[in-house]
Amino acid sequence: QVQLVESGGGLVQAGGSLRLSCAASGRTFRSYAMGWFRQAPGQERESVAVINGSGGTTYYEDSVKGRFTISRDNAKNTVYLQMNSLKPEDTAVYYCAAAWGPGGISMKTSYYNYWGQGTQVTVSS
């Protein structure tokens, strides 16, 4: 069982930056693929960025490539999402997710079976 707690959301002007953090419980954090997902009102949850257990492989949704960076610190059981050049369309609740599998990685929400409670990101124009 993994428990995930996100932090770092807030209100920012367009063009600004935020860094989200997700702290995970447990002693086998490096065996989990981790992902950031987001859900805007009235829309389905979508993938943003994912990272495998070692941190050596990452994938990004097209609209955030070059602006967002996912990373992890396995010694601190934490995954991060650095968000730069934020746009109003980035406004959503951002969720952290985990999936067991030392070498696995996926952009599909169905791949992940542990989810955090979410943190609100609002970008004003």
Image: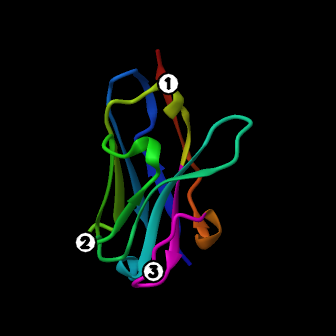
Image quadrant where one finds the N terminus: bottom right
Q: Identify the amino acid type marked 1.
A: Pro
Q: Amino acid at mark 3?
A: Gly
Where is residue 114? Give x, y as percent.
58, 68
Span shown in magenta: 95-108
In the visual, does 46 lie left or right of 10? right
- What residue would you read off at disc 2? 75
Is residue 25 visible in the rendered structure shown here? no
105 shown above or below 91: below
Q: How is the image coloured?
A: rainbow
Numbered badge on residue 15: none
- Foreground of the two, 107 or 11: 107
Is residue 120 found inside the magenta-colored segment of the image? no
Callout 1 secondary element: helix
**Numbered circle sitting on residue 104:** 3
Magenta-span inclusion, residue 104:
yes
Task: Identify the residue at image location x=60%, y=51%.
Answer: 46
Q: Quadrant of residue 102?
A: bottom left
Q: Going from the N terminus, do you reach mark 1 or mark 2 first?
A: 2
- Say which label, 3 or 2, has the lower sequence index: 2
Could you tell whether 116 is left or right of 41 in the image? left
- Distance of label 1 from label 2 (alpha carbons): 34 Å
Cα gap from disc 3 to disc 1, whole angstroms: 32 Å
Q: Which residue is mark 1?
A: 88
Badge 1 crowding class, 10 Å Cα cut-off, few under 14, some 14 to 19, many 20 or more, is some
Q: Position of residue 111 (x, y in %)?
A: 60, 72
Q: Secondary structure at mark 2?
A: loop
* Residue at (39, 21) in percent of width and height: 14
